[in-house]
Amino acid sequence: QVQLVESGGGLVQAGGSLRLSCAASGSIDYIQLMGWYRQGPGKPRELVASITSSPTYYADSVKGRFTISRDNAKNTVYLQMNSLQPEDTAVYYCKVVSWRSYWGQGTQVTVSS
């Protein structure tokens, strides 16, 4: 059984930074892709960033502000979020694609103006 544990969400003022982490544990011997999605109030879930061996993907709305990275030894993916804006407010979910897809429980990010 694979579990994804997310951490790092919270409340921050506009212009601030947060770093999200997502650690995959359990029987996972192959990771094709790791990514971050978000779902804002009344909005559909959208892909924010993803990383495979290469290249990385970023949504246009976060390019230049967010950076995704992974630690293969720890099966962990990170999302460094800088210059946060109120429109970044959402629940952020990590996703790991192995032989099947796994989702984290979500972590709330709230950006105040």
Image (spheres, rainbow, N blue to C red):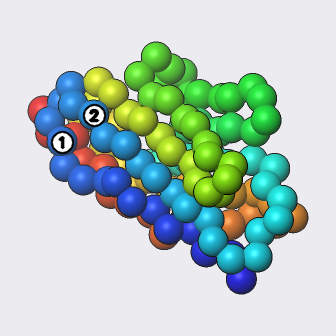
**Which residue position is annotated with label 2?**
17
Which residue shows up at 58% across the image and 37% down it?
69
Residue 108 image point, x, y percent: 32, 57
- Rounded to the nearest angstrom, the CA distance separating label 2 from label 1 is 7 Å
Q: Residue furthest front?
A: 73
Res. 42 visible in picture: no
Which residue shows up at 75% across the image and 39% down it?
52
Residue 68 image point, x, y percent: 55, 35
Task: Tell me, yes or no, whether the two marked residues, 2 and 1, touch with CB atoms within 8 Å.
Answer: yes
Q: Say if 15 sits above or below 12 in the image.
A: above
Residue 80 image point, x, y percent: 42, 35
Of 24 and 35, the residue lying toward us: 24
Of 77 and 48, the residue lying toward us: 77
Q: Quadrant of residue 51?
A: top right
* Amino acid tagged 1: Val
**Neighbour class for label 2 at 10 Å: few (<14), some, many (≥20)?**
some
Which residue shows up at 37% across the image and 43% down it?
19
Residue 6 image point, x, y percent: 46, 62
Count of all numbered marks drawn on residues in the image: 2
Question: Dividing the image into 4 quarters, which one contains the C terminus?
Answer: top left
Q: Secondary structure at mark 2?
A: loop
Q: Which mark is residue 12?
A: 1
Res. 13 visible in picture: yes
Q: Quadrant of residue 106?
A: bottom left
Question: Dividing the image into 4 quarters, which one contains the N terminus?
Answer: bottom right
* Amino acid tagged 2: Ser
